[in-house]
Image (cartoon, helix red, strand yellow):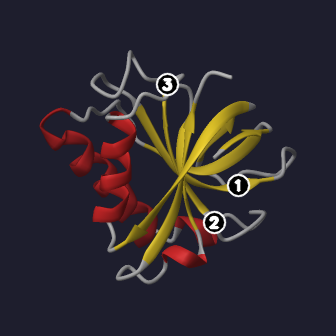
Amino acid sequence: MSETKSEFKLAGLRLPYKTTNRNHQSDTDCGTLWQKFEQDKIAELISEKLSDEIYAVYFDFEKDETAPFAYFIGCRLAPDSVIPANLDTLVIPAQHYEKFTAKGQMTGCVTEVWKSIWNSSINREFGFDFEVYDERSRDWSKAEVDVYVSVAE
């Protein structure tokens, strides 16, 4: 399902370096950032968040999914919100997306959706792609996670 989303702002944690899908390096790097996000209760520090949804964002691609990219985990804020000290911000520009929904056992169901995206013929932009974790993803045995992939209009 395709849709256009307006610009929005996130506060959270940015991976301090780019990662890559080669040799499963991003599994380790992104997993470590998730652990820090959870252990440091980052979502609770963001008092002005618009919801309890958590966004995991892939961006600043050097080429495509085979090349290095940046990673960010955070919560959505109003544009004029105050950002807590020591947290990073990321503005997701307005983009056109193809939406996918991962369903099943975490984290495997999300991995399977990404594999299907990588093997698909959709016209990816490699802009800002993101996953949305909400109340449907709390039960890891039967989770649902929406995945938004930036595409050409």
In the rendered image, the residue lying farthest to the left is 23
Q: Which residue is mark 1?
A: 76
Disc 3 crowd rating (10 Å Cα; few below 14, some 14-19, many 20+) is some
Q: How many marks?
A: 3
Q: Quick check: marks 1 and 2 in contact, CB under 8 Å? A: yes
Element assignment for label 1: strand
Q: Which residue is at a point 30% across and 44% down the rendered structure image?
A: 115
Say which of 96 and 55 sits in front.
Answer: 96
* Residues at marks 1 and 3, CA–CA distance in whole angstroms: 21 Å
Q: Residues within 10 Å of mark 2 (few under 14, many from 20)?
A: some
- Is residue 48 or residue 139 the one in the foreground? 139
Viewer-closest of 54 and 123 = 123
Residue in the picture at 72% in, 51% down: 83
Separation of marks 3 and 2 at Cα, in angstroms: 23 Å
Residue 126 badge: 3
Q: Amino acid at mark 3?
A: Phe
Amino acid found under the numbered disc labelled 2: Glu
Which label's residue is closer to the chain start, 1 or 3? 1
- Which residue is the extreme one toward the top? 63
Point out the image quarter for the C terminus: top right
Which residue is rendered at x = 48% and y = 29% of the image? Answer: 122
Q: Earlier in the sequence, mark 3 or mark 2?
A: 2
Q: Residue at x 44, y 84 (%)?
A: 139
Q: Nearer the viewer, mark 3 or mark 2?
A: 3
Name the mark on residue 53: 2
